[in-house]
C-alpha cells in the first residue's frame, strides 16, 4: 500500500474509532489495535491460509471467556489489515455492477467498523457463528 493510501485509511480508521460508543472504546483499552498493510507470512502460515485469501483482521491472545487462574494471561492484540479491509469494501473508488454499489470511503469506513467489532467479539469469546448472527462476519 502506498503512503498516501495508508494515511487516507488511517484517518478513516481514527474517525471510526472516535465514533464508536464509549463502552466499546473502553474495551479497546484492554486490547490494543495494530494497523498493518497485510498479514505477515508467519501469520498466514500459522493460520494455514495462503496470501491470496482476504484477511481484514485478527484477534490474537486468549479470549476473556477462556482465561483462568490456572492458565496465565497472554498479551492480546487486534490486528487490522488495511489491504484486506479496502479489498473487502470494494476499493477506494465507488462503482456499481450487476450486484449493486461497491467501494468508496463510506464502504471502507463501514468495513473498518465491522472488522474492529468482529475482533472485539473474539476478545469476548464470540465465535464466527455468533458474530455472523450479529452482522459482524
Image (tube, rainbow, N blue to C red):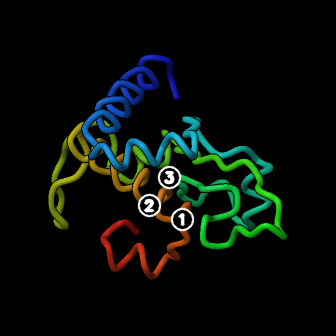
SS under mark 3? loop
For the point 73% across and 48% down, the residue is 75
For disc 1, the neighbor class at 10 Å (few under 14, some 14 to 19, many from 20) is many
71 vs 104: above or below: below
107 vs 124: above or below: above
Mark 3 and 2 residues: CB-CB less than 8 Å, in contact?
A: yes
The x and y percentages for residue 59 are: 60, 56
Q: Which mark is residue 122?
A: 1
For disc 2, the neighbor class at 10 Å (few under 14, some 14 to 19, many from 20) is many
Gap between marks 3 and 1 measured at Cα: 14 Å
Left or right: 124 as drawn, with respect to 49: left
Mark 1 and 2 residues: CB-CB less than 8 Å, in contact?
A: yes
Q: Which mark is residue 113?
A: none
SS under mark 2? helix
For the point 72% across and 56% down, the residue is 44
The x and y percentages for residue 52 are: 61, 57
For disc 3, the neighbor class at 10 Å (few under 14, some 14 to 19, many from 20) is many
Q: Which mark is residue 56?
A: 3
Left or right: 12 as drawn, with respect to 49: left
The x and y percentages for residue 70 are: 84, 70
Query: Label 2: which residue?
Result: 118
Which image quadrant: the C terminus? bottom left
Identify the image quadrant of residue 53.
bottom right
Which is in the foreground here, disc 3 or disc 2?
2
Mark 3 and 1 residues: CB-CB less than 8 Å, in contact?
A: no
Give the mark nearer the N terminus: 3 vs 2: 3
Left or right: 29 as drawn, with respect to 117: right
Q: Which sits in the foreground, 92 or 128?
A: 128
Amino acid at each position: 500500500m502506498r503512503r498516501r493510501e495508508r494515511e487516507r485509511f488511517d484517518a478513516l480508521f481514527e474517525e471510526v474509532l472516535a465514533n464508536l460508543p464509549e463502552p466499546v472504546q473502553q474495551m479497546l483499552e484492554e486490547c490494543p489495535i495494530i494497523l498493518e498493510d497485510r498479514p505477515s507470512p508467519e501469520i498466514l502460515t500459522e493460520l494455514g491460509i495462503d496470501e491470496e485469501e482476504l484477511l481484514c483482521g485478527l484477534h490474537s491472545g486468549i479470549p476473556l471467556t477462556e482465561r483462568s487462574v490456572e492458565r496465565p494471561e497472554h498479551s492480546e492484540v487486534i490486528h487490522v489489515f488495511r489491504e484486506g479491509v479496502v479489498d473487502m469494501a470494494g476499493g477506494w473508488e465507488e462503482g456499481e455492477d450487476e450486484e449493486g454499489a461497491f467501494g468508496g470511503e463510506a464502504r471502507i469506513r463501514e468495513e473498518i467498523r465491522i472488522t474492529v467489532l468482529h475482533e472485539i467479539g473474539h476478545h469476548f469469546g464470540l465465535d464466527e457463528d455468533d458474530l455472523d448472527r450479529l452482522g459482524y462476519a
